[in-house]
Amino acid sequence: MSRCEFIKGQSPNYPVSYLCSFSRVERSSYYEWLNREEKSEDLKLVTEIRSIFAKSRNTYGAIRMTRELKERGYCVNRKKVARLMKLEGLKSVHKRKFKVMTTDSNHNNPVADNLLEQDFSATAPNQKWASDITYVRTSEGWLYLAVVIDLFSRKVIGWSTGDTLETKLCVDALKMAITRRGQPRQLVHHSDRGSQYSSFLYRLLLKQNSIEASMSRRGNCYDNAVVESFFHTLKVESIYQQDFETRKEARAEISDYIESFYNVWRRHSALDYLNPSEYENLRLAA
């Protein structure tokens, strides 16, 4: 360890003037060394920040960036990270206004009661699931996406895409969720009142797996806010950043976003800035 490194290490405990005198180092020489050291550290930090920013699909702001850096062993604070990101011109993608598009609720199918009443909390996986459909524009026409989210971890546990809004779209997403979660029983499944979710086939699948249906009030997107929030995040961080020539291209992007980014890497503010898979693993291990 050099004398300057010793001074820097002890500076929180003793005055720099005393440490310089004790170490026989001129204060001006120490501060010159410290300035060079800090610039070198900043260069290393900026390199790491750029790498994380690219991996985050240009979505991480200072809060998530700081958390990721600390997980990687860097001793930094949010103000410094924000300053370096600003100097590097690294700005998270603009959060465009998201227009909610809902399924068709004009039908004569049975409608379930709203069992959640906007209580999206859960103490373990497979207590409460939520589902919905959204639309993605391509040059070939709309691609429809149905998802199932576990409200405990906000993890997308089932999803399906299709060219039309047939009931099969939602059924396939639910089947994926049931298979991936090991066919759990005695849970609540929440959705809007769309014809797909109130259809005979969908209700039959729920009944066969002892899953209790819950539905939002008519036209109230807040009753299914977690899924709407996911769709907003997906569109801002992925869909709005590119133009899709084909539905196949859009589906590949959605698959990559959900399976390789959102579920296993993206830090979620509602999960103490853990990703959904990490949150589940840590909570179940506790």
Image (spheres, helix red, strand yellow):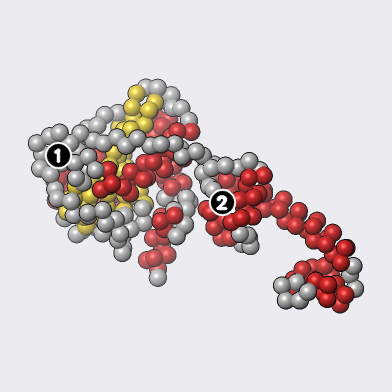
Seen at 86% across and 77% down, the residue is 22
Q: Nearer the viewer, residue 87 or 235?
A: 87
The residue that mark 1 highlights is 199
Seen at 67% across and 44% down, the residue is 87
The Cα–Cα distance between marks 1 and 2, rounded to whole angstroms, is 45 Å
The residue that mark 2 highlights is 62
Seen at 52% across and 53% down, the residue is 64
For residue 234, say whether it is visible. Answer: yes
- 161 vs 240, left or right, is left
Q: Please report contact status of discs 1 and 2: CB closer than 8 Å, yes or no.
A: no
The three-letter amino acid code for the residue at tag 1 is: Ser
Q: Quadrant of residue 163?
A: top left
Image spot of residue 10 (x, y percent): 75, 74
Image spot of residue 119 (x, y percent): 26, 57
Image spot of residue 273 (x, y percent): 47, 57
The three-letter amino acid code for the residue at tag 2 is: Ala
Residue 172 marker: none
